[in-house]
Amino acid sequence: MNERFFQLVELLFTAYAVPALIVPFVWLARRLIRARRRHPFQESAERLSRLEAAYALLAAAWFTAWLALRLGVPIEAGGHAVGALFWSAYAALNVVLAWLLVRFTAGYGELQEGRSKDRLFLRFLSVVVAQPFATACAFPVLFRIMGVVYRMKVPGLTAVQEGI
């Protein structure tokens, strides 16, 4: 398998699998929070827009960190504190996406029809499309902080002729 293709598949899988694994915990937390509230929870376009804006801010921060890495800023010199900060930012990126997925699927249908609902949906699609790019920016930064160089070598499978 081509190394670049393998890295692309791994990137796409990780970009969507990590938030998908967080979704059940977010859904459960949301259910527990809703059970404690006395009045029913009504989703609004403003709340969903704030979640989308939070995701955009985190994705922009990862792009900035990747750009700083490409420009030669020694981000690994910060030590364990910077490592914890970047890992927390990576977790936040995925938790915000999982939270957005749960809230969007639960409340989008209740919103009033119109241009704001359409814009909200287009921004949601942009978030879904941007997730692999944000993850692609996060990987090199996290690898640099951990002191790891990503050079995955997958050995090829040789064909062996064996009888039954």
Image (cartoon, rainbow, N blue to C red):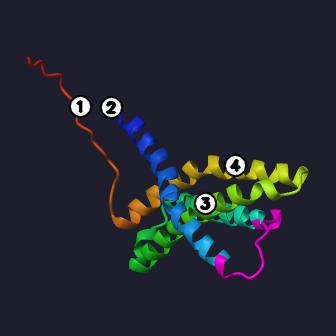
Q: Amino acid at mark 3?
A: Leu
Q: Decide which of 103, 15 is in the foreground and name it.
A: 103
- The x, y position of residue 71, in whole percent, is 52, 58
Look at the numbered discs 4 and 2 and tell me whether their residues touch, using CB distance below 8 Å: no
Q: Decide which of 12, 33 is in the foreground and name it.
A: 33
| Residue positioned 44% across, 40% down in the render | 9
Label 4 vs 2, first from the N-terminus: 2
Look at the numbered discs 2 and 1 and tell me whether their residues touch, using CB distance below 8 Å: yes
Report the Cα–Cα distance between label 4 and label 3.
12 Å
Instruction: Tell me the element at label 4.
Output: helix
Report the Cα–Cα distance between label 4 and label 1.
37 Å
User: Which stretch appears magenta?
Assistant: 35-47
Say which residue label 1 marks: 156
Which mark, residue 1? Answer: 2
Say which residue label 4 marks: 126
Q: Decide which of 105, 69 is in the foreground and name it.
A: 105
Q: Decide whether residue 38 is among the magenta residues.
A: yes
**Residue 7 visible from this viewpoint:** yes
Neighbours of disc 3 within 10 Å: few (<14), some (14-19), many (20+): many
Label 4 vs 3, first from the N-terminus: 3
Please tell me whether mark 1 or mark 3 is closer to you in this view. 3
Look at the numbered discs 4 and 3 and tell me whether their residues touch, using CB distance below 8 Å: no
Say which residue label 3 marks: 97
Where residue 149 sits, quadrant-wise, is bottom left
